[in-house]
Image (cartoon, rainbow, N blue to C red):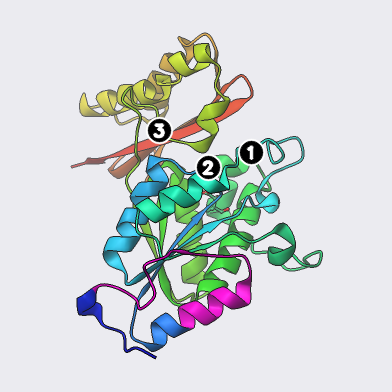
């Protein structure tokens, strides 16, 4: 085998990105990379990739010798009545984006490959997964934690990249990796936004033209919360009220939750202090959007 040569910046045979669909193929490939001293970056996705995903891939490619993207719409993280069937899919376009970003390998497994029999083992993260998103979507994080645990097990020792838009997801995955001593460094990457402030999301395509016009209300609500804090407000309830008022002004929006919390625990102390995170979830018709931002109170 040609020896690994970081100086060349290329894995022998890297010129063409590989598309694989089975777990053993991936294990073999990544084991070979590590045996030759290469590092592995993992970007888990559900496909229908956008610039937010591209930024995760760019970070993974910059930090590692070999980058794998996974594309898998994970049925476990959708509750009955959610958008599993209608979740947007476009594998050909996704692959073009991966090639453009310099990804080495894409794993796009079938549901049968990931869950060949009805599974009896799931991963449940406790306190931090029951808050906020967990309150509105009680089964969601067990589905996320289970599939990410499987992807971490398949990938082995690696750095794995997640978007900060799903702030709570990053916290849940980080806690799981830490608690289960997984050999994975969880890297959180900045939110990528449209020109008008709407956070990029595969689900934005569900928005009707009218809803799309109003959707940047989430960004404005975060700005209202940040402005309240900058003006000296420390009561989390008052900061949340300032955020909620912006959403109330958007006729097509229905607030699911709004939270001004400590960034580490995702719960509010009596007065906000130190690193603070503002989070919200809003329904526009059948589309549910989430967003967040943070600040540090000195
Ligand atoms: O953020 C997502 O797209 C998904 O929750 C993830 C992490 C790929 C797990 O299915």
Residue on which disc 3 sits: 199
Magenta stretch holds residue 29: yes
Residues rendered magenta in the picture = 9-31
Nearer the observer, disc 1 or disc 3?
1
Look at the image and tell me in which quarter the C terminus lies: top left
Report whether 20 appears left or right of 42.
right
- If you read the primary sequence from the N terminus, does the residue marked by circle 3 or circle 2 appear first? 2
Above or below, 228 against 298 in this view is above
Q: Residues within 10 Å of mark 1 (few under 14, many from 20)?
A: some
Residue on which disc 2 sits: 48
Report whether 26 appears left or right of 97.
right
Magenta stretch holds residue 24: yes
Question: Would you say residue 279 is visible in this rendering?
Answer: no
Q: Residue at x 60, y 44 (%)?
A: 134
- If you read the primary sequence from the N terminus, does the residue marked by circle 1 or circle 3 appear first? 1
Question: Would you say residue 216 is visible in this rendering?
Answer: yes
SS label for mark 2? loop
Q: From the top left corner, tell me how far across and down residue 163 is, in percent.
A: 41, 48
Pointer 1 with pointer 3, Cβ within 8 A: no
Pointer 2 with pointer 1, Cβ within 8 A: yes
Q: Residues within 10 Å of mark 3 (few under 14, many from 20)?
A: many
**Numbered label attached to residue 87:** 1
């Amino acid at each position: 085998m040609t020896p690994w040569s970081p100086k060349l910046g290329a894995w022998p045979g890297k010129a063409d990105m590989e598309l694989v669909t089975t777990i053993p193929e991936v294990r073999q490939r990544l084991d070979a990379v590590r045996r030759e001293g290469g590092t592995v970056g993992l970007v888990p996705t559900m496909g229908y990739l956008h610039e937010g995903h591209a930024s995760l891939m760019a970070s993974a490619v910059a930090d590692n010798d070999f980058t794998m993207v996974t594309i898998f719409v994970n049925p476990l993280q959708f509750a009955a009545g959610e958008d599993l069937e209608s979740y947007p899919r476009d594998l050909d376009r996704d692959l073009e984006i991966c090639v453009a970003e310099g990804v080495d390998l894409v794993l796009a497994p079938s549901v049968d490959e990931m869950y060949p029999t009805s599974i009896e083992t799931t991963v449940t993260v406790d306190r931090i997964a029951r808050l906020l998103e967990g309150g509105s979507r009680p089964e969601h994080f067990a589905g996320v934690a289970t599939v990410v645990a499987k992807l971490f097990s398949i990938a082995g020792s690696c750095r794995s990249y997640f978007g900060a838009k799903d702030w709570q997801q990053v916290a849940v995955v980080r806690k799981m990796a830490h608690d289960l001593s997984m050999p994975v460094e969880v890297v959180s990457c900045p939110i990528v936004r449209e020109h008008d402030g709407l956070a990029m999301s595969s689900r934005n395509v569900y928005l009707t033209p009218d809803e799309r016009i109003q959707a940047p209300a989430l960004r404005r609500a975060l700005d209202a919360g940040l402005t309240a804090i900058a003006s000296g407000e420390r009561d989390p309830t008052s900061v949340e009220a300032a955020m909620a008022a912006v959403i109330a002004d958007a006729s097509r929006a229905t607030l699911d939750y709004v939270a001004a919390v400590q960034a580490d625990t995702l719960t509010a102390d009596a007065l906000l202090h130190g690193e603070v995170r503002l989070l919200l979830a809003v329904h526009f018709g059948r589309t549910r959007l989430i967003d967040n931002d943070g600040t540090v109170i000195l």
